Amino acid sequence: MNKHLGFAFLTAVLGFALQACSPAGSLIAHERDAEFYSQFVNPAAEWPQAESKIDELKVMETDSAYPMRYVLFDNGKFFYQVDKLGNGEGVWTYQNGAMIVTAQRTLFNMELAISASSQTGNDTIVRFYDRHGFNSLPIKLRSPEALKAQGKSAPGLRKFTRSEKNI
């Protein structure tokens, strides 16, 4: 009996380790064509001012449970802000029906997938692994331009705290 329990435990640990090390492609919920994701992308001309103009740009953001925001540009670059982690930049590509987003941090490489949360509709999720394991969070588009066209103004972005840990 103990051999079986030990084997099951080893299998679970190895499975988790392999999953945690696997490419972001395994994080894709539902594939969509590249056109689906174009709605989230800003013109490359806005890239140099991403941090200072973030209130005016299309932003993909999560809720306050795990606050993150990503500003994607059509030159394949992105700017991000993660509460208590800080700001940074990286690259994104369209692969296997999703946006694969990567960035180099001091202590780790950030890799995540933004994909459709279902076969139909416009809802999206971001999936990634952090030091606590697998995460799958709804991520919403905040588009000041679209809101302005509807006669509305975009709500202000929440202020994030910045980490001095350089992780």
Image (cartoon, rainbow, N blue to C red):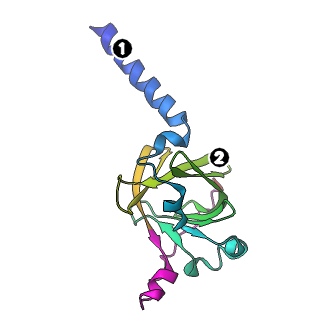
Q: Which amino acid does label 2 sit on?
A: Leu
Question: Which structural element holds mark 1?
Answer: helix
Left/right placement of residue 74 relative to residue 135 reads: right
Residue beneath label 1, please? 6
For marks 2 and 1, give the CA distance. Answer: 33 Å
Left/right placement of residue 36 relative to residue 100 reads: left
Q: Counting other residues with Cα less than 10 Å from the Cα at mark 1, is it few (<14), some (14-19), or many (20 or more)?
A: few
The one of 159 and 113 positioned closer to us in this rendering: 113
Residue displayed at 41% across by 59% down: 124
**Residue 46 percent location from the top left of the image:** 68, 75
Residue displayed at 55% across by 80% down: 55
**Residue 161 percent location from the top left of the image:** 54, 69
Give residue 58's quadrant in the image.
Answer: bottom right
Give residue 122's quadrant in the image.
Answer: bottom left
Q: Is residue 166 magenta?
A: no
Up the image or down, 163 lies above or below 109; here it is: below
Q: What residue type is labelled 1?
A: Gly
Question: Which structural element holds mark 2?
Answer: loop
The one of 5 and 139 positioned closer to us in this rendering: 139
Q: What numbered label is drawn on residue 17?
A: none
Q: Counting other residues with Cα less than 10 Å from the Cα at mark 2, is it few (<14), some (14-19), or many (20 or more)?
A: few
**Residue 149 percent location from the top left of the image:** 46, 87
**Residue 98 percent location from the top left of the image:** 51, 51
- In the picture, the quarter occupied by the N terminus is top left
Left/right placement of residue 157 relative to residue 102 reads: left
Residue range highlighted in magenta = 141-165
The one of 165 and 149 positioned closer to us in this rendering: 149
Q: What numbered label is drawn on residue 107?
A: 2
